[in-house]
Image: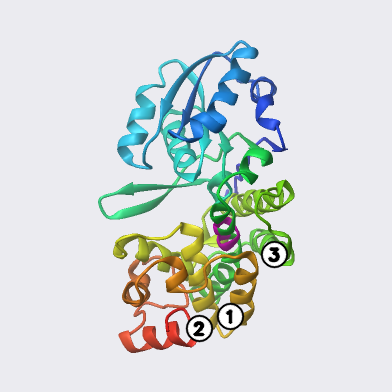
Amino acid sequence: MDYNRVKLPREIHSGPGVIKETGSICKDLKLKGKVLVASGPHTMKIAGEKVIDSLHNDNFDLETIIVEKPSLDAVSQVQDCMNNVTAVLGVGGGKVIDVAKMASTQSGVHCLSIPTAASHDGIASPRASIKNKGGSVSMEVEPPVGVIADTQIISQAPFRLLAAGCGDIISNYTAIMDWKLAHRLLNEDFSDSSAALSLITAETMIKSASGIKEGLIESAAIVVKALISSGMAISIAGNSRPASGAEHKFSHALDILAPKPALHGEQCGVGTIMMMYLHGGDWEFIRDTLKTIKAPVNAAQLGIDPEYIIKALIKAHTIRKERYTILGDRGLTVESAEKLARKTKVID
């Protein structure tokens, strides 16, 4: 008998100061015994220490570890600290949370996601982006059992990170277009409910664009909610289709090719402008929305040389070949890639 199993976070706590309730939230989730707090060098100071204080106040035994990079080595290092641990608390940006999700999945324990920035939808999703020799690889993991998003802390993160999160959400538009295309042409499985949630999330983000301001707790709350919803759409689908199409392939290609790539969400936002053009959609509206949010809309604002934009467009179709998108199986020629980038004003 065929059936679908959807795994979602059991509890989501969001608001200013909520990080101070970490200990009681862990108790509500029936977590007992020793827990491991994994954080980054900077995020340990701004959030990790608050988590540790809260856990101590609720009489949890705990270990701590600093995660430097989202690599397989880092995953192994976290696992090495997990003797008799019942849960891993990933406190930090997407890199720390991805490592925590992967390590907890491989060790069969729970993971709590405690983001310090809202830069991409990995906060609550069943995917983790881990670096290996060939670049970053998106891998399936168990979604976090809970999310604790302190909007006070998130609002104080560099605004560039919040704008990148907006770009990642807006890219759902072209991701759904690619998914529908694969469904029509290749009869790929399609989830109406997952696609609807993904699109509603993107539409809400666009309607809120003028209200996304630096330092505002309300702005952080809007983006966090959208990123968590996007992660849930991925869980419902059972894959990342609702939030990852040709624009993500373009971003992954840039990660491999560019000497200094921009943020994931920034690259996906610029990719969405170009892929919307290929789909025959209103790419100018996407570009103008990103401008309103103060997210990058061209190569110069990404800080990436135009030649790498062209190379990434040409290479993009070779990333995750099994995932059919508007780029097709053959991809773009040099001429068509240059025309696309110039037409959408991504390069001059």
Residue nearest the observer in this picture, 35 or 343: 343
Query: Viewer-nearest of labels 1 and 3?
Result: 3
Residue farthest to the left, as pictured: 133
On screen, residue 336 versus residue 209, left or right, reads: left
| Residue on which the image places disc 2 | 344
Span shown in magenta: 164-168
Q: Is residue 111 visible?
A: no
The answer to whether 110 is drawn above or below residue 274 in the figure is above
Secondary structure category for the residue under label 2: loop
**What residue do we see at 68% from left, 41% from top?**
151
210 in the magenta segment: no
Q: Check disc 2 and give the amino acid type.
A: Thr
Question: Do the residues bearing badges 1 and 2 touch, measured as CB atoms within 8 Å?
Answer: yes
Secondary structure category for the residue under label 3: helix
| Residue on which the image places disc 3 | 209
Q: CA distance from mark 1 to mark 2?
A: 8 Å
* Image quadrant in which the C terminus is located: bottom left
Q: Is residue 31 visible?
A: yes
| Residue on which the image places disc 1 | 283
Residue nearest the observer in this picture, 84 or 47: 47
The answer to whether 76 is drawn above or below residue 57 in the figure is below
